[in-house]
Image: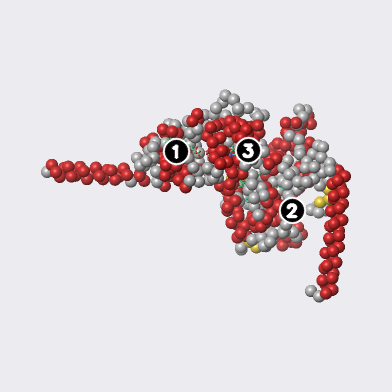
Amino acid sequence: MNMKQILICTSIIMYGQAALAQKAEHAQAVTEAIKIKPYLPPTEDTIPDNEFGAMVRFGRDIFIDTQAHAGKYVGNGLNCVNCHLDAGRLANSAPLWAAWVKYPAYRGKNKMVNIMQERFQGCFKYSMNGKAPATDSKELKALTSYAFWLAQGAPTGVDLPGRGYPGLAKPEKKPDFKRGKQVFAENCVLCHGDKGEGTRQNAGYVFPPLWGKDSFNWGAGMHRINTAAAFIRANMPLGKGGSLSNQQAWDVAYYVNSHERPQDPRFKGDVAATKAAYHQHQCRYGDKSGNHLLGKKP
Amino acid sequence: MKITVVLVMMLSMQVFAISVHAAATLTGDAIARQGNGNGAPPCMSCHGDKGQGVPAVGRPYLAGQSKTYLVKQLTDFLNKRRSNSVMQPIASALTAQEINAVATYYSRLPLRAAPNKQKNGAQGTIGESLASKGKWSVGMPACFKCHGDKGQGIAPNFPAISGQSSKYLKAQLEHWQKGERSNDPVGLMQAVVEHLNDAEIAAVTKYISAQSPAKAK
């Protein structure tokens, strides 16, 4: 680096810091103006006993047991609740109430402003590897009612604490397959199986599959290593969220997402072209894992 | 002549004794009914003739639990990862083969929980809420998320708990709290008990004990 570069760098950093500080100040001002408290959604026993309440309950049932209540739109073994814990209520598990107050919103994924229903459709298409129910279908009306009911009383337009999965600091060491495999063996196999195949009982999964044909597809948010690491760090092993180190969460997310799963529905007929168009982020689509090209089914 | 007969008899008795002692041949069923003749009493005498347990005095049912789970518990008594003054010496008196045989035997018996139906099993109680919804405000999943939607267990690692003696269930949670049981994989039960107070333990164990575990395949 020569002097000029250093100067440029420093000024970028300084500018960045100033901008950040400004942003922080702004955020603080906003916070003070509306006093964001941790939001607690209403308890289920307060769902009203009327037509609206029936829709809310149907939405909750779809969310918890998507297989049974919206099965024709699902192409894998998952339910919404698998990635949005406690029936979409749990903070730091991308809760529905925190999403509700932020929609409509612009999404880079489809480069347009989405309404809440379109966001639901996204999770059907990718996370559930299925096909999206129509915006005016009874399933989406019910899910919308449920989210609306969960968010009653929450301030609109605000990033409520607990939204999404809490972002993780970059790992100290580059995420690693071998270390990830070890974390997986010690903390995850018990429930998710050593081939990530999950555990079945009766008709369905009691512990969901993490890769393979019954898991989320290559277009789902969870296939990104940073997103999976954030989810896992906050929520896994089940009941012991926060127990893994930052590094362990990155390593195990890298390991989980270095396995084959259903194709990206936007597949262009060729892994390299699909990678170039849709996978310019932290993921392993189109990479080699051993001898296998990820995204190209064995 | 007489001497030879006696000698032969003595010899054959010895052979007989040896073959009895070659415990590898003991079936799980025999151990359960008669013990192993080597320090382990008949399991039945405490766990019931059908492996159904004796709920009133806190002796658990064994029938229908997964073989993996039962082998693990017997081994854990041995290793003192689970302390109990009654079961520790019994488990220590069993060989690895005997543990395997008797665990196989009990795992194949039909689950015979005798749910205590009188009270405490009601919906809308704290016990029900903890068992089927959990206490997510502190990060605790529902008991039934790990033990099956009716508490019937999820083989091979998660035991059936529904219809189990409430006295036994409560004792186990307290053992985890006191560190007398530390054999749970990934520390999963340790994390659970950290989130429960005495009243909640009493409520949830009574509720679960009153449920009937429809055995899942």
Residue at image x 65%, y 29%? B125
Circle 2 sits on which residue?
Answer: A167
Q: With A255 as the anchor, is B99 left or right in this view?
A: left
Q: Secondary structure under badge 1?
A: loop
Residue B126 % position (x, y): 65, 32
Label 1 marks which chain's residue?
B
- The quarter of the picture where the C terminus of chain B appears is top right
Circle 3 sits on which residue?
Answer: B196
Q: Secondary structure under badge 3?
A: loop
Circle 1 sits on which residue?
Answer: B86
Q: Secondary structure under badge 2?
A: loop
Residue A275 % position (x, y): 73, 60
Residue B86 % position (x, y): 44, 38
Q: Kindly identify which numbered label has been placed on residue B173.
A: none
What's under tag 3, amino acid-wise?
Answer: Leu
Residue at image x 72%, y 46%? A93
- The quarter of the picture where the N terminus of chain B appears is top left
